[in-house]
Image: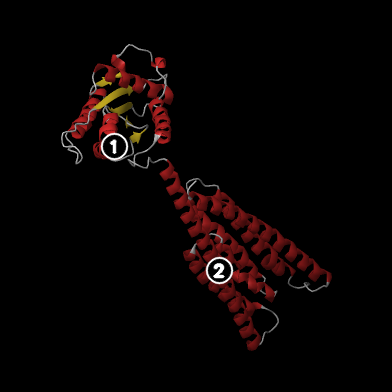
Amino acid sequence: MDIDEFDCSRCKRFQVEALKLCAAGTLTVFLFQAFYISFKIHQNALTNDFNHFLISKLVIPSSINILATILCAIVLKLKKASCTFKNYFAAYTVFTICSVVSIFHVSLRFMLVTTGLPLIICAFFSDRKMISAMLASCFVTLTASIFMLEFETSAIDPLTIFMMIMGVVSDIFLSLIIALMIIRVQEERKTFIQTFTEKQNSLIRELKIEPLTKLYNRVSLSEASKSFIKKFQSGLMKPHLVIIDITNLKDVNELFTHKNGDKVLIIVAELIKSNMGGIRRAFRISGEKFALLFERESTDQVIYKVNEIKDDVAGVKFDFSSDLKISLTAGIAKLRLDWDEISWLNAALLALCNAKAENPSWIIDYDSIPENVSDISVE
């Protein structure tokens, strides 16, 4: 799982938590207002406007809350909806519940503080654009709530209204500061995780790279072979494995020292890289042996490419011996359905052994020899 997939998974969890918060808020507000109405009835305070009070304080706001929560649950289950869209919908469902409380229950003036709550919810989605949009929405709700104060039966003096507005504005900006702090911490955490992951992946890549030639190593060949076999079994490719041997490398080490032998290995590796288009399908599997993987090329095309590598290597003039000619021998094995990666490697090695027995610079295809693949062990 990469960092983007982790973010999406994290946001999905927050979407569900936001939905739960909306459901809990809807139920809490309904019960609170039902209790409040019961108290008013008990005090004989709703003798004249009971129906109006019931509809405006309980039926309408609860209906809006329930509808918003149900719509949120439906949207979160949509497979085609993007993660960002679901984030916005969940956040604005919370905003709807808070707005309903702030607007319809403005008689309970302390409820105005719910106006800024959605900003903190937005912070958990780590979306600064969402916070900017929500900030503007909060002030729209605040305006509507102040407007609803005009319908209150008890007169409110201008100073009280002004102090209420300032208090709610302060609460909104405090919520904004908290939200931005949460986002900053999440961004720092994400940066740390990305940096750590990149370093970890770099170390993993280094473990799969042979240090002298900078080609992939034997472990990488095993992993790549397994991947090729799966794709072959699915009919996605017809792969070949080639094992190349530097026939006279031991002579170079004995006559010109191992240091110059390493130069030969590096040069051969560079020529393999250039012919194979990089190191993605090139491997050094032992001292003088290299492996090549071909995905969809025919056997003739593979032989042609190996011959190109042989010719390039044969044409190199070395600074420590201008007369030295490096020869390559190769064995080719086209993958079969009943082979695993070990059998495939064994087949290419068997073809290589037959090529070396015939001539120190030959190329032999496994399909052209009669021996059974199990007659040879992996080197």
Task: Name the kind of residue labelled 2 in the image.
Answer: Met
Left or right side of 25 for 307: left
For numbered disc 1, what is the local secondary structure? helix
**Foreground pick, 134 / 304:** 304
**Foreground pick, 267 / 30:** 267
Label 1: how many residues lie within 10 Å, few (<14), some (14-19) or many (20+)? few
Q: Residue furthest right?
A: 42
Residue 164 placement (x, y as % from top left): 64, 81
Q: Earlier in the sequence, mark 1 or mark 2?
A: 2
Q: Is residue 55 above or below residue 272?
A: below
Please tell me in which quadrant of the rendered image residue 108 appears.
Answer: bottom right
Task: Name the kind of residue labelled 1 in the image.
Answer: Thr
- Given this view, does label 1 or label 2 mark the residue nearer the observer? 1
The image's mark for residue 181 is 2
- Which residue is pictured at 21% across the width and 34% down the height? 313
- Which residue is pictured at 45% across the width and 52% down the height? 199
Q: Is residue 34 above or below residue 143?
A: above
Q: CA distance from mark 1 to mark 2?
A: 63 Å
* Residue 221 in sight: yes
Please tell me in which quadrant of the rendered image residue 153 appears.
Answer: bottom right
Residue 369 placement (x, y as % from top left): 30, 13
- Mark 1 — residue? 257
Q: Is residue 206 above or below residue 190?
A: above
**Foreground pick, 92 / 228:** 228
Image quarter (top left, top right, bottom left or bottom right) of the C terminus: top left
